[in-house]
Amino acid sequence: MTVIARALPALIGGLLLAAFPLVGGAFYVDLAATIMILAIFALSLELLVGHTGLVSFGHAAFFGVAAYATVLLSSKTVPPSVLWLLPAAMLVAAACALAVGALSLRTRGIYFIMVTLAFAQMAYYVFHDTRLGGGSDGIYLYVKPALAIGGVTLLDLDARLPFYYATLFALCLTYGFLLLVARSRFGHALAGIRANEQRMRAAGFATYPYKLAAFTLGGALAGVAGFLYAVKDGFVNPEILAWSQSGTVLLMVILGGVGSFRGAVIGALAFVLLKELFQSEAVFGGFTRHWQLMLGLVIIAAVALMPQGIVGLSAQWRARRRARPDVVHAD
Amino acid sequence: MTLATFLVQCLNAIQYGLLLFLVASGLTLIFGIMGVINLAHGSFYMIGAYMAYALAPWAAAHLGGGFFTALLIGLVLSVVLGYLLEWLFVSYLYEREHLQQVLMTYGLILVFEELRSLLFGDDVHGVAAPGWLAGTIPLGELMTYPVYRLFMSGVCLVVALGMWGVIARTRVGMAIRAGATNREMVQSLGIDIRMLYRLVFAAGMALAVLAGMIAAPVSSVYPGMGNQVLIICFVVVVIGGIGSIRGALVAALLVGFVDTFGKVFFPQAAGVLVYLLMAAVLLWRPEGLFRQA
């Protein structure tokens, strides 16, 4: 009963998203797809930040590397099959995460934050300075991937609605998978590492392989988001690996509320809607050019006023009410 | 590579390294003593550069001074600004997790960057070096070296020596060293730790602003200049070891040499070399070269 009750909001959310294209126009369907892609990205980081206690400031690297892999591995004439292209993109991202994680996880705390940032910056320069991926201009994805079996195209990611539902499917799968991971023995070990790594080691856990596995898994899932991003826009440039992208995804996780997968999805939704609001000419007129100023102020206010994020607001509010002596409790 | 070019590149490497040291030393002090990860430190560098751009003509017109009057005004302003910023934004962060510090200071970056855009626009601006420093000195038969770059290295060296003097030889320096080792103990000995933090933050900001101001005539001022420096300074701090000024100096010079000679020998991979250096150091000593226990 409680399991169903707790899963209910996610189920309702999923159903609403599934029904959304019936009412939303093309622009809003695209916007919702963007939100879902970023939600997958934020979920992959939440596994590290909220569930393992690893504050990675270079998560955009894996997102970006997978996006580049998607474009570079596709042929220019024949639609590549999703069946091998998506796993390939995930594999590339996971391999990068494994290499970066193996080095960065030797450090902790502030060091870890800075080292992951520096490695992401290194990936940025690889794509920015060399001709591997078209340099700073970026490259185009000419033919979008499809899923065809025996000559029959089952899924063409070039079309809006199939892409929307494929993204929704990927989001649900990622969300469900992460919930399972969190409930598994592996997930419990990660939670233990987050709470007290010393004690986990004392209890006989070699924490390094667990952290490295989580980091690699986070990278692979960021790869799913990167793949979808490249397919949606049909274009990648080095800016998707830039450190501001890592900052943005971290912002989504924290804005939503660290420690719950729900928070990551809500954070992605809140971030994209805020960005749309600040960039809307109708509301802010010519000032939209400086939308990042408003975003910056919102970030500062969010840190100061709601340290537990959006999902923590109700708990925070209840705690405040309880702390106030003049409120008489019925119980 | 002739001896003269080699010498010029060495001088460039030292100058770049020393400049990085000015920014990174403030960053490492703020990490080491206050335990705060300050992403906005690169913005302080940018603020310094734009101060030089905006203040130098103003000082020339109203005070009759030039670049150096601007330098002085900028330093005073930066200390005041650093003091205010610590009070308004950073002082909430001491008890919070690193995650929240990252986010708050990331928000500050966005705010500073957009304020810069509002005040000065998004164009690249040049800043004139003071006249008597604008010349060059001959090196060998064909090469020359700009006097201003030597002046930059000189300023950085003087500041580095001054910093060593303050930290190693004065009472405030003693409190800073003690604060880096054991915060609670310093507090219980009756030293006003909040005041100490505010001073350290203001000093760190002044160092970054000074670096930005003296770098402005060479690098000119442009959007996003702070972020570039910030990330390289992270690398410097990681290599040197958090909280270690000596480590920051050694690492900054190391990064200066690797970057400068990397651009000469491997222009394609120049952007990546510094990070490879960091990876190598991490493999060898995960805590950095000079991490104190």
Image (cartoon, rainbow, N blue to C red):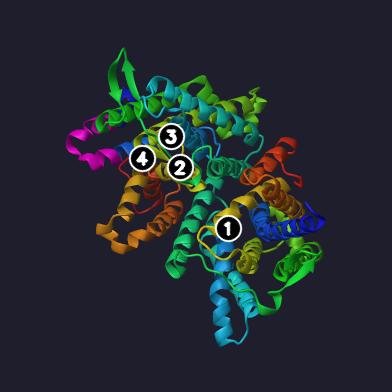
Please report the residue visible at 47 percent of the width from the left and 27 percent of the height from the top. Answer: A90
Please report the residue visible at 24 percent of the width from the left and 42 percent of the height from the top. Answer: A27
Tag shown at residue B42: 1
- In the rendered image, the residue lying farthest to the front is B142
Q: Position of residue A250 (x, y in %)?
A: 47, 43
Task: Name the kind of residue labelled 4 in the image.
Answer: Ile
The residue identified by callout 3 is: A226
The subunit carrying tag 4 is A
Asked which secondary structure carries label 4, the reply is helix
Q: Earlier in the sequence, mark 3 or mark 2?
A: 2
Tag shown at residue A138: 2
Q: Earlier in the sequence, mark 4 or mark 2?
A: 2
- Magenta stretch? A12-31
Q: Nearer the viewer, mark 4 or mark 2?
A: 2
> Height in image: B278 above or below B128?
above
Asked which secondary structure carries label 3, the reply is helix
Q: Nearer the viewer, mark 1 or mark 4?
A: 1
- In the rendered image, the residue lying farthest to the top is A150
The subunit carrying tag 2 is A
Q: Nearer the viewer, mark 1 or mark 2?
A: 2
The image quadrant that residue A29 belongs to is top left
The subunit carrying tag 3 is A
Tag shown at residue A272: none
